[in-house]
C-alpha cells in the first residue's frame, strides 16, 4: 500500500542520488526519529541550526508533474487559467493587499511517492490570469503557514525542511517574511519549537498566534506568538490538548477557536478557545464527531462551519494514510452558546479538501482525497453550503481531480484553485471558480 511521504530537497543532484529507486533511498517517513542534521528540532526543543537559513539551490526544478493547463468547454463555473511555473501541493496561497496571490513552496511527488519540497514562489495576477516568478524563499518548506501582517508583509513559518542528503525529515522552527514591495524574502526570528501542520492566526493587535502541530514524533500542545514589531516569537500558553491537523478560526469576538485534530490518542472531538485578552486557552463544547484534516470556515452570521476530515488518525504523524475513510458530516459552532450542532451532510465524503466562503455568504467545497488504489483517488467534484437552508448542493466539477490544493477568494468574488495532487502527479494547473449570478 502506498501513502504520501514528506521530504524537502534543495538540490537535484542529491535527490537523484538518493531517490533514484525505492531500494536506494535513505529517506524515511516523518513518524520516525529525527536525525542529526543541522536543524533537528524534536519534541519541545527547538532546532539547533542557524536561523539564517540558506536559500537553497539555484535551480528550482526538482521532479516533474502536470505542467499543462486544463481545457474546458467554457460551460462550467470552473474555468482554466494560466498554469503555475512549478507543480506543487501542500503549498500556501495568500491574497496580498494589491489583489494578487502569493504562492509559496510546497512539494512535488517524486518517483518514490515522496512529497519533495521546492524553494519556489510565484505571484498570480487576476487581471492577467497569469503566474509570474517572484523572489526566492529562504528555504524549501511544505505544510507551513503563511499569514498576511498588518504591514502587508507575509509571515511564512515552520513546515518540513530538508537539511542535507541523506537525512531524516524534521520540521523546521525557521520563519521568513515576504515583502510585496521589494518582492523578496528575508529571515526573521525562529520559533521556539520546530513544527509542521500547525496553525497561524492573525490576532486583533497585529501579532500572530502559532498553535500546535507536530514534531517528527508527536503532536504539540505548545503555542507561541510572533510580534512583527520586534521580529521575534515568544512562548505562549499551552493548549488544553496536544493536536495536529486541527483548525484555528478567528471569531468576531477576537477569540480564536481551535477545533479537532489528532494526537497519540487518535482523532479529537475537543475544541478550545484562545482569549488574547487573558492569554489563556480554555475548553469549549465538543464536536459531535472526532475529526482531523477537516476545514473550518467563519460564516457571515458569526458561526463556524466544520466539514469533512476523518474520525481516525489521518496523518500517521507526517503522512497521509493510504486507506482513508473521509467524513461527509458537517457541523456548526455557535460562539454564543459555545456548542457544536449538526448541519446538512455533504454530497461527498472528503478530506484534504478546501472550503471558501463566497461573497454571497455560501461556502464552496472543492476536491479532496479518498485513498490509494492504482493511483491517488481524489475528487474533481464541488458543492455549495447554504447557511440559510443549512444544506449542501452539488455544483459544477473542477476540470481535474485535486487534493492538497489551495483555494483563494479573489477581490472580484471568484476563487483561484491551484495545484494539488491529481491521479498520480503533482499539478501545476489552476482554475477559477466563477459563482453563477442569481
Image: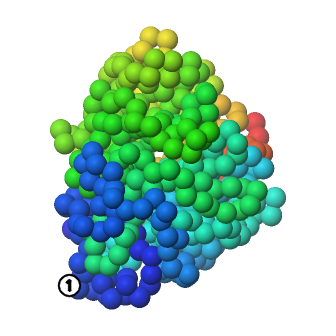
Q: Position of residue 358 (x, y in %)?
A: 66, 38
Front residue of 286 and 38: 38
157 sits to left or right of 39: right
Image height of 233 relative to 271, above or below: below
The residue carrying mark 1 is 23
Image height of 381 relative to 373, above or below: above
Q: Secondary structure at mark 1?
A: loop
Q: Position of residue 272 (x, y in %)?
A: 37, 24
Q: Give the quarter of the figure containing the N terminus.
A: bottom left
Q: Position of residue 435 (x, y in %)?
A: 70, 45
Mark 1 is surrounded, within 10 Å at the Cα level, by few (under 14), some (14 to 19) or many (20 or more) other residues, namely: few
Which residue is at 27% across, 31% downward? Answer: 241
Image height of 361 relative to 186, above or below: above
Which residue is at 78% across, 50% downward? Answer: 98
Which residue is at 68% across, 67% downward? Answer: 134
Residue found at the very far top of the displayed protein: 337
Q: Is residue 366 visible?
A: no
176 sits to left or right of 13: right
172 sits to left or right of 277: left
Image height of 301 relative to 175, above or below: above
Quarter residue 29 falls in: bottom left
Front residue of 247 and 325: 247
Front residue of 235 and 422: 235
Q: Position of residue 204 (x, y in %)?
A: 61, 27
Q: Give the quarter of the figure containing the C terminus.
A: top right
Amino acid at each position: 500500500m502506498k501513502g504520501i511521504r514528506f521530504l524537502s530537497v534543495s538540490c537535484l543532484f542529491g535527490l537523484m542520488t538518493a531517490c533514484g529507486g525505492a531500494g536506494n533511498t535513505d529517506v524515511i517517513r516523518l513518524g520516525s526519529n529525527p536525525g542529526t542534521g543541522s536543524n533537528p528540532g524534536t519534541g519541545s526543543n527547538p532546532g539547533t541550526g542557524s536561523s539564517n537559513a540558506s536559500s537553497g539551490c539555484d535551480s528550482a526544478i526538482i521532479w516533474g508533474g502536470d505542467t499543462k493547463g486544463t481545457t474546458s468547454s467554457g460551460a462550467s463555473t470552473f474555468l482554466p487559467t494560466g498554469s503555475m511555473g512549478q507543480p506543487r501541493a501542500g503549498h500556501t496561497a495568500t491574497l496580498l493587499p494589491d489583489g494578487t496571490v502569493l504562492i509559496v513552496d510546497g512539494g512535488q511527488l517524486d518517483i518514490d511517492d515522496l512529497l519533495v519540497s521546492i524553494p519556489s514562489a510565484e505571484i498570480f495576477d487576476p487581471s492577467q490570469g497569469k503566474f509570474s516568478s517572484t523572489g526566492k524563499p529562504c528555504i524549501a518548506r511544505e505544510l507551513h503557514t503563511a499569514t498576511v501582517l498588518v504591514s502587508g508583509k507575509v509571515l511564512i513559518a515552520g513546515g518540513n525542511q530538508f537539511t542535507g542528503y541523506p537525512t531524516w525529515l524534521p520540521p523546521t522552527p525557521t520563519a521568513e517574511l515576504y515583502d510585496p514591495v521589494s518582492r523578496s524574502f528575508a529571515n526573521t526570528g525562529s520559533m521556539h519549537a520546530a513544527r509542521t501542520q500547525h496553525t497561524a492566526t492573525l490576532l486583533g493587535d497585529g501579532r500572530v498566534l502559532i498553535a500546535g502541530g507536530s514534531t517528527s514524533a508527536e503532536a504539540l500542545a505548545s503555542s507561541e506568538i510572533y510580534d512583527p514589531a520586534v521580529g521575534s516569537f515568544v512562548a505562549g500558553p499551552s493548549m488544553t490538548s496536544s493536536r495536529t491537523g486541527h483548525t484555528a478560526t478567528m471569531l468576531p469576538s477576537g477569540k480564536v477557536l481551535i477545533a479537532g485534530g489528532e494526537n497519540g490518542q487518535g482523532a479529537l472531538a475537543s475544541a478550545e478557545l484562545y482569549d488574547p485578552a487573558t492569554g489563556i486557552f480554555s475548553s469549549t463544547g465538543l464536536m459531535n464527531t472526532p475529526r482531523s484534516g477537516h476545514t473550518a470556515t467563519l460564516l457571515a452570521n458569526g458561526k463556524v462551519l466544520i466539514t469533512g476530515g476523518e474520525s481516525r488518525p489521518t496523518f500517521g504523524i507526517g503522512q497521509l494514510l493510504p486507506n482513508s475513510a473521509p467524513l461527509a458530516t458537517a457541523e456548526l459552532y455557535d460562539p454564543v452558546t459555545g456548542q457544536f450542532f449538526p448541519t446538512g451532510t455533504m454530497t461527498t465524503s472528503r478530506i484534504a479538501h478546501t472550503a471558501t466562503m463566497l461573497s454571497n455568504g455560501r461556502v464552496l467545497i472543492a476536491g479532496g482525497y479518498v485513498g490509494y488504489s492504482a493511483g491517488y483517488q481524489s475528487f474533481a467534484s464541488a458543492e455549495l453550503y447554504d447557511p440559510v437552508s443549512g444544506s449542501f448542493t452539488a455544483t459544477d466539477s473542477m476540470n481535474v481531480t485535486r487534493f492538497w490544493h489551495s483555494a483563494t477568494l479573489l477581490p472580484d468574488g471568484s476563487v483561484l484553485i491551484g495545484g494539488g495532487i491529481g491521479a498520480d502527479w503533482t499539478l501545476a494547473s489552476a482554475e477559477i471558480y466563477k459563482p453563477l449570478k442569481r
